[in-house]
Amino acid sequence: MKVRTALSLTAALLAVSACANVKDVRDRDPVFFGSTQRSAEDYTNCVADAWKGIGVNFERKAVRNGFELIQQDSLGVEAVLTTTTWKGKTETRLSTRITRRDQSLIEPANLCLQQ
C-alpha cells in the first residue's frame, strides 16, 4: 500500500511540475519573430482570426504596448504570441514548448505580417 501511495504522489508531482505558465513559455527562444507596419491590435486580430479558423483555442490578453495570444492545454501553456508596438514599430514573437504545433501556429503569424 505504501508503494502505491508513493507512486501516486510521484505521478502527481510530475504532472504538476510539467505544467508550464506564460512566463515559462515566453522566456523560451522564439520559433518565429518579425515586424510589421500594422498596429499591434490589427496584427493580433489577424492572427487570432486565423487561429480560430484552424481550431486553435487561445486566450487574448492586453500587455504593455500590445497583446498576447496564449494557447494552452491540460498541461499548461503551450504557446505565447506577444505583439507590441513601440515608437511606431510593431514586433511580434512566438514561443512554444511543444514543437508538434509550431508550424500550424507560425504560418498564420507569418501571413499576417505580409498583409
Image (cartoon, rainbow, N blue to C red):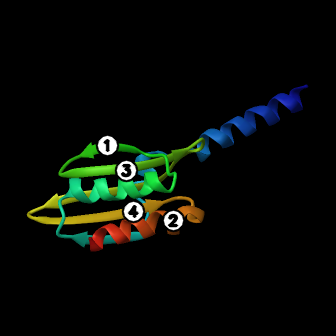
Q: In this view, does 106 lie above or below 62?
A: below
What is the quadrant of the N terminus in the image? top right
**Amino acid type shown at disc 3:** Leu
Sequence-first tag of 4 and 2: 4
Q: Are marks 3 and 4 in contact (CB under 8 Å)?
A: no
Left or right relative to 8: residue 59: left
The secondary structure type at the circle numbered 3 is strand
Mark 2 or 3: the one toward you: 2
Q: Quadrant of the C terminus?
A: bottom left
Q: What element carries label 2?
A: helix
Let me know if residue 52 appears in the view: yes
CA distance separating discs 3 and 4: 9 Å
Where does label 1 land, which residue?
61
Q: Which residue is drawn at 44% across and 70% down?
A: 107
Distance, label 1 to label 3, CA atoms, is 7 Å
Is residue 30 among what the camera can see?
no
Depicted 32 relative to depicted 23: above or below: below
Tell me which numbered mark, 3 or 4, is placed earlier along the sequence. 3
Q: Mark 4 points at which residue?
A: 94
Per the image, the residue denoted by label 3 is 69
Q: Mark 2 or mark 3: name the one nearer the start of the chain.
A: 3
Q: Quadrant of residue 19?
A: top right
Name the amino acid type tagged 4.
Leu
| The one of 52 and 26 positioned closer to us in this rendering | 52
For the residue carrying disc 2, how many other residues have a C-alpha within 10 Å: few (<14), some (14-19), or many (20+)?
few
